Amino acid sequence: MDKPVIVIVPGAWHQAIHYQLLADRLQQAGYDVHALTLPCTGDSPKQDVWKDDIAHVRATVERASDSGRDVVVVMHSRGGLPGGDAVEGMSKADREQQGKAGGVVHLVYISSFAASEGMSLSDIAGEPAPWTRLTEDKSMIYPETVEQVFYNDCPPQIAEEQKKHIRPIPPSVLSAHKARYAAWKHIPSTYLS
């Protein structure tokens, strides 16, 4: 039996490269791993970051599922919201009912937001964290003190390397979207804090 495909959905400000150590370990263990960089992460604001992020995750999950493979979706931090919405109708059971092979068999939330329907990130977490700052034109948010906030338990050389790859996000990433689908209610899930 094939091992499941693993799709990693990053947290805010993070890209695929931030999960490279994890992806390498999983690949060494024989897993097919797809660590994503979401469209919302970058140097210029996008029009509909939520729609684009959800579509990107869904397309990756769908490609793996359409090849008949089981899929495990690993979501970190803010990644739980677009990741959760993206897997609606994509569970293995849902796809079997549609006469399709493959599908999502498990969700893993890593210090993530497992939202109920109708909840936004700001509903769950409150106002933007005090360790973030808006650009002068208020179009993007940057995290500050990332060594303490994100990488406080990492060796300094890893924290420094990870810090180089942090990217800004538009403010709408934190408040504009309300979850449509509480994936954890429908697909077996594990939560790691």
Image: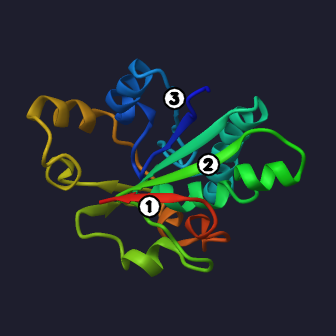
Query: Mark 2 = which residue?
Result: 105
Whichever of callouts 2 and 1 sits on the residue coming sooner in the sequence is 2
Question: Which x, y percent locates residue 32?
Answer: 54, 25
Where's residue 26, x and y in %? 41, 28
For marks 3 and 1, give the CA distance.
Answer: 37 Å
Quick one: label 3 or label 2, which is nearer the N terminus?
3
Specify whether 28 is left or right of 92.
left
Of residues 9 and 52, the one drawn nearer to the viewer in this rendering: 9
Circle 1 packing at 10 Å, graded few (<14), some (14-19), many (20+), is few
Say if 142 sits above or below 64 in the image: below
Cα distance in 3D space between marks 2 and 1? 43 Å
Question: What is the tally of numbered marks visible in this picture?
Answer: 3
Nearer to us of marks 3 and 1 is: 3
Q: Amino acid at mark 2?
A: Val
Residue 76 or residue 25, whichever sits in front: 25
Residue 90 in sight: no
Q: In the picture, which quadrant includes the C terminus?
A: bottom left
Query: For the residue labelled by badge 3, is the local secondary structure a helix, a strand or a loop?
Result: strand
Relative placement, left or right, of 59 versus 176 is right
Q: Amino acid at mark 3?
A: Val
Residue highlighted by disc 3: 33
Q: Residue at x 61, y 80 (%)?
A: 118
Q: Residue furthest front?
A: 1
The residue pinned by badge 1 equals 137
Image quadrant holding the N terminus, namely: top right
State the residue at coordinates (67%, 71%). Answer: 180
User: Of discs 2 and 1, which sits in the foreground?
Assistant: 2
Secondary structure state at the residue bearing disc 2: strand
Query: In terms of depth relative to the viewer, which is nearer, 13 or 85?
Result: 85
Q: Are marks 3 and 1 in contact (CB under 8 Å)?
A: no
